[in-house]
Amino acid sequence: MTANASITNTSGPLPPVRSIAVTGGKGGVGKTNLSVNLAASLAMLGKRTLLLDADLGLANVDVLLGLSPQYTLADLVSGRCELDELILEGPAGMLVVPAASGRRHMAELQPAQHVGLVNVFNDLQRELDILLIDTAAGITDSVLTFCQAAQDAIVVVCDEPASITDAYALIKVLARERGVDRVQVVANMVRSPAEGRGLYEKLSRVCERFLGDVSLNFLGAVPHCDWLRMAVQRQQAVATAYPASPSARAIAEIARRAARWEPPANPRGNIEFFVDRMIRQGAIA
């Protein structure tokens, strides 16, 4: 299913887009589930939202949503299609750019190709409010580049020692190598709000001790939830399938906070999604 043509721009300058990367130090912390449901929740709030599956080698956003893409980012990289042809419509009117799974060459793209994927969004002629980027886990070049190119980076953590350790390692590399000095934190799969806050404070203490120039912000906590597991099995977003469930309500609250973030006014002077829109806006202003 292709996206609704009504949000394709026909005239006038396109509005700036707030870009938000969702990432995690290790796999298995629920990063993609958060990305999918945050995108759906933002769309339900009336935000024109595009979700980019940037886990280039092991993509699964389309699987989680039961979508059947005709093309993926692998086709874009090989020149078989344009970016606009990739876009699918998901739940609540959110849009999805699907990637390929099991394509080793996509996992092994060169740094310049990651920059090229960021820059190709300059050509997208659609009216959007928010771009969500679901990155791979870890500290590979693709993760670092996509987080650097977004205005905000959300790091997902859960209550495992390895999750905290790897989240700290990711934040350190983003700060030292890519100049990312502000990070949003979401505690996932927690047993209580207090556990979520405690996870954030644990990570925050380590960052304050060793990374004094990085600002952390607690964006929220998502509880363990059987409804979420049921939605995954049905290949649906819990935000739309079971909106009254504890996980859907928690993610909706995170979406309300993110929806209040202002669109970027000016380019920061390095790699950035939709930078041409900011430049044009500045010239008009």
Image (spheres, rainbow, N blue to C red):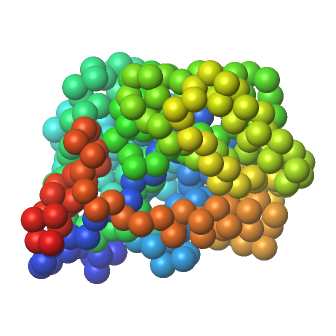
Residue sitting at 75 percent across and 52 percent down? 221
Q: Is residue 105 above or below residue 68?
A: above
Q: What x and y, as percent, mark residue 200?
A: 74, 41
Task: State whether residue 147 appears in this view.
Answer: yes
Quadrant of the image occupied by residue 110: top left
Residue 187 placement, left or right of 3:
right
Quadrant of the image occupied by residue 198: top right
Residue sitting at 34 percent across and 41 percent down? 149
Residue 22 placement, left or right of 150:
right
Q: Nearer the viewer, residue 275 or 43?
A: 275
Count of number-bearing discs:
0
Quarter of the image for the N terminus: give it: bottom left
Q: What x and y, as percent, mark residue 154?
A: 56, 45
Residue sitting at 64 percent across and 62 percent down? 254
Task: State whether residue 2 appears in this view.
Answer: no
Residue 12 placement, left or right of 93:
left
Q: What x and y, as percent, mark residue 164?
A: 72, 28
Q: What x and y, as percent, mark residue 37?
A: 61, 59
Q: Is residue 77 above or below residue 278?
A: above
Residue sitting at 79 percent across and 23 percent down? 161
Quarter of the image for the C terminus: give it: bottom left
Q: Is residue 10 above or below residue 138?
A: below
